[in-house]
């Protein structure tokens, strides 16, 4: 009786130990599988690369995973969004030409979105900056007045009008004291430039001269001939 009890206890102990070993083995296998998945690089199929030639030669795992999802038929409804993400990832990898090309291809298919707009802007600015640096450092020349400067000036003005709201507010606050100082300085200059009026302590005496009195005029009475019936009366003395 006692021997049977001891045997049963030993069997139970051995069974529990075997179960524990089995669970530990499964846990190790799962960890190894996850590690293999993390280390194992993404490899695209030839058909996927043929359909997306811009991914040929790419080694970035994040970009390859995006294209892996693009080529997955179960993601057919998300292809455009995934390609937009791929374009942004190309820009982040310092590939502005590929990013701009992919964004342009999508826009030509009437596919639009904020991500594609951002990619187009960022890639274009990056390309323009590279060209400008090459122009100044390698070719040793400036922007031309009639060809390259006008669009650059227009872009600068458009960027100024599209500044974020916090930047505009900060800029206005910084410029307010400068405007006030300029206004005060201008007012001071105006006051200083006003001509001073001269006042004389003694007024000049003015003499009035009386006009000479006019002499009385005398009129000599004219001789009046007496009238009569005799025309020779005046000859009598």
Image (cartoon, rainbow, N blue to C red):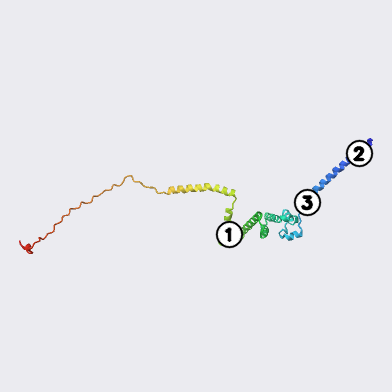
Determine the residue positioned at 57% across, 53% down: 161
Give the mark nearest the N terminus, 2 or 3: 2
Give the mark nearest the N terminus, 1 or 2: 2
Question: Seen from this angle, which residue lies furthest top?
Answer: 2
Q: Secondary structure at mark 3?
A: helix
Callout 1–callout 2 Cβ contact below 8 Å: no
- Is 180 on the left-hand or right-hand side of 119? left
Quadrant of the snapshot with the C terminus:
bottom left
In the image, residue 50 above or below residue 17? below
- Is 56 on the left-hand or right-hand side of 215? right
Give the mark nearest the N terminus, 1 or 3: 3
The disc label shown at residue 8, or none: 2
The disc label shown at residue 74, or none: none
Q: Position of residue 67 (x, y in %)?
A: 73, 56
Label 1 and label 2: CA atoms lie apart by 92 Å
Q: Secondary structure at mark 1?
A: helix
Determine the residue positioned at 88% across, 42% down: 15
Label 1 and label 3: CA atoms lie apart by 50 Å
Q: Nearer the viewer, mark 1 or mark 2?
A: 2
Query: Within 10 angstroms of label 2, few (less than 14), some, or many (20 or more) residues?
Result: few
Q: Position of residue 59 (x, y in %)?
A: 73, 56
Label 2 and label 3: CA atoms lie apart by 44 Å
Query: Within 10 angstroms of label 1, few (less than 14), some, or many (20 or more) residues?
Result: few
Q: Position of residue 111 (x, y in %)?
A: 67, 57
The disc label shown at residue 151, or none: 1
Determine the residue positioned at 48% across, 48% down: 183
On the image, numbered disc 3 is attached to which residue? Answer: 37
Q: Nearer the viewer, residue 126 or 162?
A: 162
Question: Seen from this angle, which residue lies furthest left?
Answer: 237
């Amino acid at each position: 009786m006692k021997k049977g009890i001891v045997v049963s206890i030993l069997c139970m102990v051995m069974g529990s130990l075997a179960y524990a070993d089995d669970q530990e083995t499964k846990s190790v296998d799962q960890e190894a599988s996850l590690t293999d998945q993390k280390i194992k690089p993404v490899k695209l199929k030839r058909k996927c690369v043929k359909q997306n030639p811009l991914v040929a030669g790419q080694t970035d795992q994040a970009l390859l995973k995006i294209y892996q999802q693009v080529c997955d038929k179960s993601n057919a409804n998300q292809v455009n969004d995934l390609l937009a993400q791929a374009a942004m990832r190309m820009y982040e990898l310092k590939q502005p030409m590929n990013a701009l090309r992919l964004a342009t291809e999508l826009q030509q298919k009437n596919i639009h979105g904020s991500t594609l707009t951002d990619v187009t802007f960022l890639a274009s600015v990056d390309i323009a900056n590279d060209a400008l640096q090459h122009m100044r450092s390698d070719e040793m020349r400036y922007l031309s007045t009639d060809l390259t400067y006008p669009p650059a000036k227009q872009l600068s003005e458009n960027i100024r009008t599209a500044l974020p709201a916090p930047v505009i507010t900060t800029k206005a606050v910084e410029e307010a004291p400068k405007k006030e100082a300029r206004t005060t300085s201008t007012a001071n200059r105006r006051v200083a430039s006003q001509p001073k009026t001269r006042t004389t302590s003694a007024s000049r005496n003015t003499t009035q001269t009386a006009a000479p009195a006019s002499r009385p005029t005398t009129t000599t009475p004219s001789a009046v001939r007496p009238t009569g019936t005799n025309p020779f009366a005046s000859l009598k003395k």
